Amino acid sequence: MSEDYLARIRADNVLSTTLRGQPLTFHSTWGLFSPREIDEGTELLLRHIEVRPEDDCLDLGCGYGPIGITLAKLAPAGQTLMVDKDFIAVEYANLNARLNQVPNARAVLSNAFQHVGEHRFDLIASNVPAKVGKELLAIMLHDAHAQLRPGGRIWVVTITGLRRLFERSLKEIFGNYEKVKQGKTYTVACAVKADG
């Protein structure tokens, strides 16, 4: 293995893309999810998610930040918090927020909602890992419900094989479920926290 090859693979992966009409550039590195391109699930979620300009948003499991940074661009009057349990992901998400000049987005280290504190959100979005496990999923969705303001929405994209599990879980916790878009590989769904 040559020094030249090692230097090349140690350098950041840099990808330029357009998400929801926003031209964005992301730096990422090996070991993070989908380090060389925006994955299909993230693209599908961002194509269908509904964001208001004043929404305070949370990107749960942000990776290097494509969802959270796009949400912050779409909600310039709100604040977007990005969380991930991987400190490298948090470093890259914060770097990408700076590089894309998104002052209303920041990332913090947190295992799901563990270090989110008392923040309340209008919108929570997540590209949920296929291997999340039903226990962590239950914790995540219950905590998401607690952290949403009345009328707040949770948007998730999952592999299509898990859509029934998410439908049951969201109906149980939120009392409602909407399948927004089902593709061959991924499904986008949302649920709303009842007012009051």
Image (cartoon, helix red, strand yellow):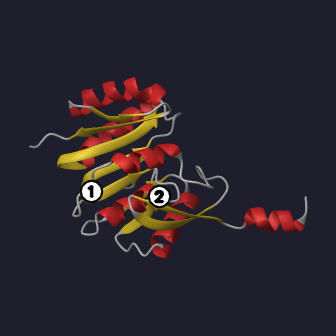
Image height check: is 57 above or below 11? Answer: above
In this rendered view, identify the residue nearer to me: 146 or 35.
35
- Identify the secondary structure beneath mark 2: helix
Can residue 145 be seen here? The reply is yes
- Splitting the image into 4 quarters, where does residue 89 fall? bottom right
Q: Residues within 10 Å of mark 1 (few under 14, many from 20)?
A: few
The answer to whether 130 appears left or right of 79 in the picture is right
Quadrant (top left/top right/bottom left/bottom right) for the C terminus = top left
Q: Position of residue 55 (x, y in %)?
A: 24, 59
Marks 2 and 1, how far apart in space?
Answer: 24 Å
Q: Which residue is mark 2?
A: 66
Q: Which residue is mark 1?
A: 118
The answer to whether 151 appears left or right of 108 in the picture is left
The residue shown at (26%, 38%) is 191
The residue shown at (38%, 49%) is 47
Q: Which amino acid type corresponds to the residue marked 1 in the rendered image?
A: Glu
In this rendered view, identify the residue nearer to me: 132 or 26.
26
Depth check, mark 2 against mark 1: the one in front is 2
- Splitting the image into 4 quarters, where does residue 140 fall? top left
The residue shown at (40%, 46%) is 45
Q: Residue furthest right?
A: 2
Query: Which one is earlier in the sequence, the residue at label 2 or at label 1?
Result: 2
